[in-house]
Amino acid sequence: MTDTPEDTRPSDYEELHAISDIPEDYPAPVESEEVLEAAADAATEVGAEEERLYVASQWQLTWWKFRKHRMALVGGAILIVFYLIALFCEFVAPYDPAAFFAQYKLAPPTAIHIVDSEGALRAPFVYGRIRDRDPETLAYIYDDDTSDIHRIKFFVHGTPYKMWGLREMDLHLFGIDAPREEQSILVFGTDRLGRDIFSRLCYGGRISLSIGLVGVSLSLFLGVFLGGVSGYYGGRVDTIIQRVIEFIRTMPSIPLWMALSAALPPDWPVIRVYFGITVILSLIGWTGMARVVRGRFLALREEDFVLAARLCGAGEVRIILRHMVPSFLSYIIASVTLSIPRTILGETGLSFIGLGLRAPAISWGVLLQEAQNVRSLAQAPWVFVPAVAIVLTVFAFNFLGDGLRDAADPYAR
Amino acid sequence: MDDSNLLVEVKDLETYFYLDEGMVRAVDGAQFDIYRGKTLGVVGESGCGKSVTARSIMRIVPKPGRIVGGQILYHRASNGHGEEVLDLASLAAQGDRIRSIRGAEIAMVFQEPMTSLSPVHTIGNQIAEVILLHQGVSKKEARELSIEMLDLVGMPLPSRTIDQYSHELSGGMRQRAMIAMALSCRPSLLVADEPTTALDVTTEAQILTLMRRLQDEMGMAIMYITHNLGVIAQMAEDVVVMYMGEVVEQADVDTIFHDPVHPYTSALLQSIPRLGQKLGEGRRLASIRGMVPDPYALPKGCKFHPRCGAFKAGLCDQIEPEMLEVSPGHRVRCFLDAKLG
Amino acid sequence: MIVYIIKRIGMMIPTLIIISMVSFVIIQLPPGDYLTSYAANLRQEGDMVDTDELEMLAERYGLGQPIYVQYWKWVSGIILRGDWGQSMEWRKPVKDLIWERMALTVFLSLISILVSWFVAIPVGVFSATHQYSMPDYLFSALSFIGAGTPGFMIALVIMWIAMRQFGLNVGGLFSREYMVEPWSLAKFVDLMKHVWMPVVVIALGSTAGSIRTTRANVLDELQRPYVETARAKGLRERKLIWKYPVRVAMNPFFSTVGWTLASLISGQTLVAVVLSLQTTGPMMLRALTSQDMYLAGSFLLLLSTLTVLGTLISDILLAWVDPRIRMGS
């Protein structure tokens, strides 16, 4: 559709910025004899360091550079925790996400104490709760019963579940020693129906976080395949694929997503809707990936080492797999990392306005529907916790992606 | 030489760069003089501090570099008679004082004519800007002066070129426009930082002739920075050889070419191919052995000693040689000449 | 230049044709046909089903006939008669519903973009010229947060704060009394009173992005030799920064305004839903959920057309501000 150079597009701006740290305190000029000698010693060490740099593989270089990005490491750590929770949500969540506590509707989060009412230090515990009604508004209010102390225990037996739909189990990461009716450890409170938000968050994470991975894998597959074909062969194939990409990119993404998700039949089972939404989200996502791959392919095709490999008689497949793929893999990984949060946000947004996954499916977007009404939000701010989880995930991915992108080019200074 | 013709005296100039990796002494005690109407050639390998010296005089040293010591005494011609001596190094880099000199009395031509002109402003806009800034003239007069300048530097069709953008001009034409811009306020010193390095040989010759001609017409001094000794021979009256931020040898152009003392100067000279020079069977053109040392870990003693053919153990690698005058106007930073003196 | 513009407009036409086809097909995807749901809808509301009216609609839009006939009737209606079809839910012609919403959407986006530039450019330039200073770190952190947080969440948080602190319900673009009023000066004043909230929310995300872009571009340009040339002329630092590097860095920035505008318009859909604005987003959402196909299809087509137009404007601007492209083509 357009002849605009790619680098003028907002989506490509992201690649322009780079962050590095320059300390404020510069080393002062060295003068004395010993210092000079020390500097000379340091120089030989620098030599050794350089030696190490020359022999290091690209992966090592990338890792060394990545390690310096503290925020990227933090982001990575957060994501590992989130994905572990999502993977083992049956075990981490203390309760069944669909079960409700009739006695705790819109109950605020349970405070976890380590000091009891007499001021004595003890192992983490929660108080039992007493429910009251506000005489004026008739809303429920919850109070701690300081005489009713429940110690938090780890690896307790509680609500039975089927791990990954395979094995009956009832072991949970944590819980308190009380019959179900008196259970009162509600880490993030409950929703209107008295369902434990923490448990729902764990289960919702499984869908929302995996939709990012699955969606991006799909985009990646399409993008790498079509982008690779486009960049490697060029010519007419390239023109056609580029036209298609440009066309898709001229469609406004959010209205398009909305129209397509609205077209999903309402009687589809959850799993089908899940894949439907994933496909819809990847439909636009692959074009960005294809551009990256094509760009790298075009650049690499001209590189001397590719020519050298060709002159040595290496076959096309070998050139692609052995020489070209490794040199742009890191770029792909970085751009994948940056497009996962976009997919997650896509799902969340769609589900939030009721066009994506629908209850009884649990995703972070579905959970956020509770927060759609600002009155209920004002009444029970904790229903907004899923938003915090989403934002944390998005930031973690962005930090990780930024770090990876900078590390992706280990030879750049 | 006659002191009344002194234009700029650079004394013990020290310009350091404070980087993450450490401090780089880009200019480390450089010392030389520039005379009115004369050309001073500054030679040295890449990274020897030539360009930073030039930028120090202009007071446009890029961050994180700054002048930490020394003086740059500029003998400014006053309206009446006599002159005023200003230490440029002590002025605020952004102050009114230096800005009234920069561009007007001391102007600069850069290495890359391709990128040294703004891509989104016309040539005329960029030349007239200097004129408007330093001379109290109207926009119309500035435009006329710009056309005049373009004509002076031999730009074909100056009244058309003035409204063109830099990408519409060839490299040689752009450099002419740069020179027109630099000379538009008739400066007393033109600093030329490798102005012909990016050009092809024919264009280079044209630009050099042009600069020589303009110098004759306008009488400005030129500080000509290059790594090309051939150009030096053609352009300069006096020569300064720099190595690792220091001036290692200084003399008039004939002495440098025919009677060099510093081993580095000799090595530079030997690395130029000469017409008619007979190289013996299997002999190659001489090159200076070794590499430019790591700027973060300079060698002790004479900075050139690891690459020097006449290196004396226990002396050159221990003590840094002083600048000595071997004959009037010929100064060398080397122990070798001790035997001469 | 004119040749270039004509060429670009020519290239736009096939894209628009394909877009209209795709929009139509997508809207046709849900099962069930328009007429049956229309009749059902009428019945549900207790209205008499006027078979004559139904037949007339069927004839007019080619309902029940093959999809290409329907498509042709729809598109030719739009082009020849300005007839965008009939909204089943509102029981009004679509053209009576969409234009005010479209205008409000574009208006809101324009104000937001101006506000975001007004903030982002000075901040971005400051950040770039004071790289690694405390304010630079602060702005970078803020813009990182602003760019990463989806607008609809920011909208929710702001509404929540307004509710909690001031007991205000800040949704909507008009006070209740002006909601259905025809346009007047008083209504416009009322609009201006309400518009700040959505503008803040919508502008926040794009401001954050623009700060990052400005900072990165100016930093890039500051390295270029022409900046040094300008400095060597004796120009004041502030003046030379705004005249040279900022001017060059702003090129891609202003020239992508069409693109940015289009992405703002489609991107603010969720914010509009949360804030219940009288813009395209909420109405399109409602049309989609109630399968009001002509209304939804018209919105999809219009929003896509806006994107294409935005790209066109951007391309022309880019050619206009950048002499290199202007001359090249």
Image (cartoon, rainbow, N blue to C red):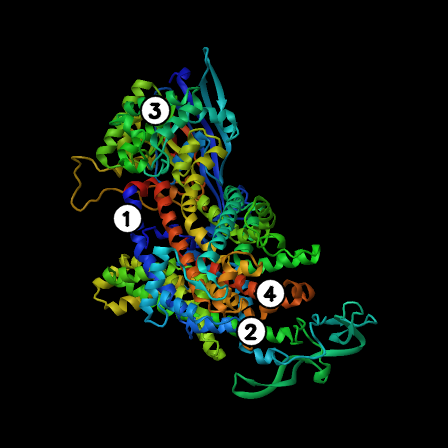
Label 1 residue SS: helix
Q: At 75% from the left edge and 79% from the top edge, which residue is drawn?
A: A150
Label 3 residue SS: helix
Q: Which residue is mark 1?
A: C7
The Cα–Cα distance between marks 3 and 4, rounded to whole angstroms, is 65 Å
User: From the viewer's perspective, is residue A261 above or below residue C276?
Assistant: below
Q: Nearer the viewer, mark 1 or mark 2?
A: 1
The Cα–Cα distance between marks 4 and 1, rounded to whole angstroms, is 47 Å
Where does the image place residue A55, in percent across and percent down from the top left?
38, 61
The Cα–Cα distance between marks 4 and 2, rounded to whole angstroms, is 17 Å
How many numbered discs sit on the rendered protein?
Answer: 4
Label 2 residue SS: helix
The Cα–Cα distance between marks 3 and 1, rounded to whole angstroms, is 38 Å
Label for residue A372?
Answer: 4
Label for residue B146?
Answer: 3
Where does the image place residue C259, in percent across and percent down from the top left?
42, 51
Q: Nearer the viewer, mark 2 or mark 3?
A: 2
Q: Nearer the viewer, residue A38 or A213?
A: A213
Query: Tag 1: Cα neighbours inside 10 Å, few (<14), some, or many (≥20)?
Result: few
Q: Nearer the viewer, residue A14 or C183?
A: C183
**Residue B258 visible in the current orientation:** no
Q: Which residue is mark 2?
A: A204
**Image quadrant where residue B7 sits:** top left
In the rendered structure, the answer to whether residue C111 lies left or right of residue A327 reads: right
The Cα–Cα distance between marks 1 and 2, rounded to whole angstroms, is 50 Å
